[in-house]
């Protein structure tokens, strides 16, 4: 935000905001209100976070042909590819918004949505435990640790218990039976920070995926969209979510992700400032975690654009995905819970 304000001032663009009111949303609407007022003489008009999120998301789904994508795993040892997914018809869908916590919304139309579930185990949980256990000083550092490690080195697997697959319940030897479970099998075991962080990341992601699938099944919805700041520049968690949803649904449901993740709230606030016609009605549902994440990802850069993958991945994306090619093997076997 400091950089944005500096840029505005450098081009004298901040005068356009002087003595005016700008729609803002999310936790930052409260955190930075005084800062914006003092630096830009700009008033702040706070708009509901989830309403803005869905207004912007529905607009993008309607007007951006390749906004939505899924991860396609070709086979063991091969890199997962991004594939565009058509959202023709759009509604209904389940939106799983992962921020500090998790909110699960059933979206039935551009005007109607309901919160049908949620969890306090989200991105804030991951970062908090990385700070407590591993000394990570920022979300960026926590994510760097988690994407470099191997959770199989820490988690107890079905194979560790039974010596191989558990055929009666179709559980592969590589299925995680207990997060961090290897630590109780070997009291002298030394664990690296990266492997511990990877186990935390897998634990959080697989639990969110299972909860999302159960909600989708309860409501008879096939399309599950995952969003939120936790997924920005976080291919590892996207792979965990994708693999888990594929396992629990036996391949009948795909985990869907979004090309312009990180911008829907701002886009929605802008659209709502132009008139109420695009805004959803007042949400219904149980109170609880909203999935807000004003703090969790302040340091992260905007998400890289997504396109249908034809095998010619951009270098940065391919390098990131290469780190997790082993996880790509878990499409059929690592559902994250025995």
Image (cartoon, rainbow, N blue to C red):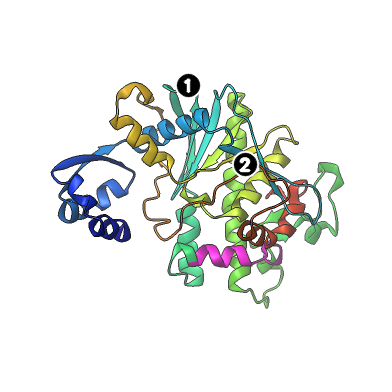
Front-lying residue, 94 or 3 = 3
In primary-sequence order, the first of circles 1 and 2 is 1
Left or right: where does residue 70 sit relative to residue 54? right
> Which residue in the structure is indicated by mark 2?
210
Residue name at image x 56 percent, y 67 percent: 145
Image spot of residue 337 (x, y percent): 68, 49
Q: Main secondary structure of the magenta part?
A: helix
Mark 1, secondary structure of its residue: loop
User: Magenta span covers which residues?
Assistant: 141-154
Front-lying residue, 332 or 43 = 43
Image quarter (top left, top right, bottom left or bottom right) of the N terminus: bottom left
- Relative height, residue 250 to residue 238 (above, below): above
Residue name at image x 55 percent, y 66 percent: 144
- Residues at badges 1 and 2 in contact (C-beta under 8 Å)? no
Residue name at image x 43 percent, y 39 percent: 264
Disc ID at residue 109: 1
Task: Classify mark 1: residues with Cα within 10 Å, few (<14), some (14-19) or many (20+).
Answer: some
Q: How many marks can you see?
A: 2
The span from disc 1 to disc 2 (Cα, nearest Å) is: 25 Å
């Amino acid at each position: 935000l400091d950089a944005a304000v500096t840029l505005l001032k450098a081009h004298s663009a901040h005068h356009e905001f002087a003595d005016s009111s700008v729609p803002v949303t999310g936790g930052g609407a409260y955190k930075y209100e005084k800062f914006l007022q003092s630096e830009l003489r700009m008033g702040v008009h706070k708009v509901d976070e989830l309403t803005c999120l869905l207004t912007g998301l529905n607009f993008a789904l309607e007007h951006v042909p390749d906004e939505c994508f899924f991860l396609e795993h070709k086979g063991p040892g091969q890199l997962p590819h991004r594939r565009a997914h058509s959202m023709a018809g759009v509604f209904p869908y389940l939106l799983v918004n992962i921020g500090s916590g998790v909110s699960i919304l059933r979206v039935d139309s551009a005007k109607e949505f309901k919160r049908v579930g949620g969890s306090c185990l989200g991105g804030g949980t991951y970062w908090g435990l990385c700070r407590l256990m591993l000394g990570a000083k920022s979300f960026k550092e926590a994510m760097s640790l988690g994407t470099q490690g191997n959770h199989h080195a820490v988690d107890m697997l079905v194979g560790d218990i039974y010596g191989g697959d558990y055929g009666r319940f179709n559980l592969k030897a590589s299925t995680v039976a207990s997060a961090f479970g290897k630590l109780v099998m070997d009291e002298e075991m030394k664990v690296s920070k990266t492997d511990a962080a990877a186990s935390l990341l897998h634990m959080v992601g697989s639990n969110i995926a299972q909860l999302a699938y159960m909600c989708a099944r309860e409501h008879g919805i096939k399309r599950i969209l995952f969003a939120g700041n936790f997924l920005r520049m976080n291919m590892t968690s996207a792979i965990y979510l994708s693999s888990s949803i594929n396992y629990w649904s036996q391949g009948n449901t795909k985990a869907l992700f979004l090309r312009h993740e990180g911008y829907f709230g701002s886009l929605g606030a802008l659209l709502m400032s132009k008139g109420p016609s695009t805004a959803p009605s007042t949400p219904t549902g149980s109170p609880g975690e909203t999935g807000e994440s004003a703090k969790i990802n302040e340091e992260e850069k905007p998400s890289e654009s997504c396109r249908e993958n034809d095998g010619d991945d951009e270098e940065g994306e391919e390098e990131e995905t290469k780190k997790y090619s082993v996880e790509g093997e878990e499409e059929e076997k690592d559902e994250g819970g025995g």
